[in-house]
Amino acid sequence: MKKTSLLFVLFYILSSGQKYTKAEISLINQGNIETALPIYQTVDSLQHKVLLDRSLDADPKDKTTKILVNRMKLALLSTKSGVGIAGPQVGINRNIIWVKRVDKVDKPLEYLINPKILWRSEILNLGPEGDLSIAVFRDYFYRSQIIQIEYYDVEGKQHTEIVEGFTAVIMQHEIDHLSGILISDKIKKQKLKNFEKVEFYKELQ
């Protein structure tokens, strides 16, 4: 009986941890919910703080998650040239990202809820990256060439797949955002090594 009660308490704590706060709900629903949320910038001190915070998991089936997912997509589309966006970039520290699947036919945009990288290849490639939240910044970064990723959709279905090339780079970049890691800070810590330089952007052409 005690074990059952303990499991119930643990389940309640974990599930309640996914509930949106009133402030998050207000921000997600501000204005017309059929429009894009504004993209946060590092030049704004308050927005920069949000970008540096770690994100929490989201309940895939929550109606608020669906609204957030849609408004994030619209925010990404509003940039015209962006290939990915993460929750913190629209002011919501939740583990949700959008990526351009350049590894698929017609290069569609796809969202990933609560994404987790289960495995990364030791083979690293060097490619160019920019950031929607950092104006006039672009540099080269080392990323794993191949990753295994797990995530959920808005129906609560779990997905696991192997991704490589520039799509894997986008996913790694956006998942960094969920941990409060910005490429402007990452470049300071990254030590250059003798790895092959790969022009991933060619996959976008």
Image (cartoon, grey):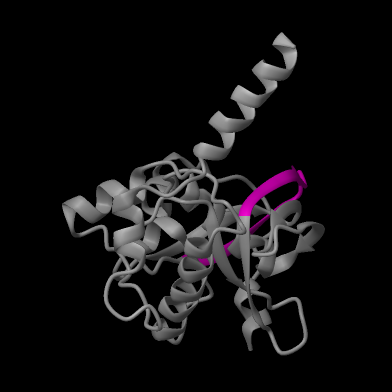
x then y, percent, for residue 97: 55, 62
Would residue 192 be seen by someone viewing this image from the given angle?
Answer: yes
Would residue 141 be seen by someone viewing this image from the given angle?
Answer: no
Tell me if residue 82 comes above or below residue 183 in the rendering.
Answer: below
- Main SS of residues in magenta: strand
x then y, percent, for residue 171: 62, 60
Q: Which residues are magenta?
A: 114-129
Q: Nearer the viewer, residue 187 or 46?
A: 46
Tell me if residue 113 comes above or below residue 167 in the rendering.
Answer: above
Q: Residue furthest top?
A: 2
Q: Quadrant of the N terminus?
A: top right
Q: Residue at x 63, y 89 (%)?
A: 205
Q: Residue furthest front?
A: 1
Tell me if residue 181 comes above or below residue 97 in the rendering.
Answer: above
Residue 77 magenta-highlighted: no
Q: Residue at x 67, y 68 (%)?
A: 167
Q: Residue at x 53, y 68 (%)?
A: 66
Q: Nearer the viewer, residue 3 or 67?
A: 3
Residue 146 location, quadrant: bottom right
